[in-house]
Image (cartoon, helix red, strand yellow):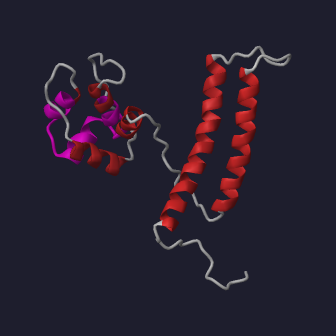
């Protein structure tokens, strides 16, 4: 059962983020169980007319247990960035993936700049639908690059790379 609040919440307001988090986390019953709260208390946490606030620890618990991203996206936006979930897929060939993502990214940025420039092939404008399509492609590429950055950060911190060949191996 998804969380479907009745009261209107202004986009981006804390209570609308909490409502989105609850929906992503599986709805009221799931939130009640994970946070060990009553139905009334869960609804109050997302009610714009209630002074009840959810703690960071509870937000973290919901995010970790369910993979819900609403709070992470909002905090990233507030900090002037974007939240890009890392793909959990196999990254055994991560250098090749990063290389291909970089090539695609370069082609897409060049095409985007061409689209924004008025030429005989382009009016120099991007409409809403084009922007949504471009964002989907860019988000996929950024996710691959973010995953590669995460892997490099782990290596730089001295964590062992489970995919690395042993030194001296000529496979």
Residue 54 in the image, given as x and y percentages of width and height? 20, 36
Residue 24 in the image, given as x and y percentages of width and height? 37, 37
| Residue 33 magenta-highlighted | yes
Q: Give the prevailing secondary structure in the magenta stretch.
A: helix
Residue 124 in the image, given as x and y percentages of width and height? 73, 16
Please state if 9 lies on the left or on the right of 121 as rendered.
left
Q: Residue at x 63, y 83 (%)?
A: 167
- Say which quarter of the image contains residue 121: top right
Answer above or below: position of 164 versus 112: below
Count of all numbered marks drawn on residues in the image: 0
Q: Which residue is drawn at 66% across and 54% down?
A: 98
Q: 142 or 15, which lies in front?
A: 142
Q: 160 or 119, which lies in front?
A: 119
Answer above or below: position of 12 versus 152: above
| Residue 77 magenta-highlighted | no
The stretch in magenta equals 19-45
- Say which quarter of the image contains residue 132: top right
Evaluate whether residue 1 shows in this view.
no
Answer above or below: position of 108 versus 12: below
Of the 4 image quadrants, the one containing the N terminus is top left
Answer above or below: position of 166 versus 1: below
């Amino acid at each position: 059962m998804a969380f479907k609040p009745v009261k209107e919440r202004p986009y981006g307001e804390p209570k609308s983020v909490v409502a989105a988090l609850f929906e992503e986390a599986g709805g009221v019953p799931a939130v009640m169980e994970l946070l060990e709260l009553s139905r009334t208390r869960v609804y109050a946490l997302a009610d714009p007319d209630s002074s009840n606030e959810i703690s960071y620890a509870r937000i973290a618990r919901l995010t970790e247990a369910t993979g819900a991203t609403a709070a992470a996206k909002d905090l990233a936006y507030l900090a002037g960035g974007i939240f890009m979930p890392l793909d959990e897929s196999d990254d055994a060939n991560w250098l090749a993936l990063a290389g291909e993502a970089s090539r695609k990214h370069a082609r897409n940025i060049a095409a985007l700049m061409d689209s924004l420039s008025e030429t005989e092939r382009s009016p120099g404008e991007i409409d809403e639908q084009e922007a949504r399509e471009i964002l989907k492609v860019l988000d996929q590429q950024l996710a691959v690059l973010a995953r590669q950055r995460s892997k490099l950060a782990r290596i730089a911190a001295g964590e062992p790379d489970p995919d690395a060949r042993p030194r001296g191996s000529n496979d």
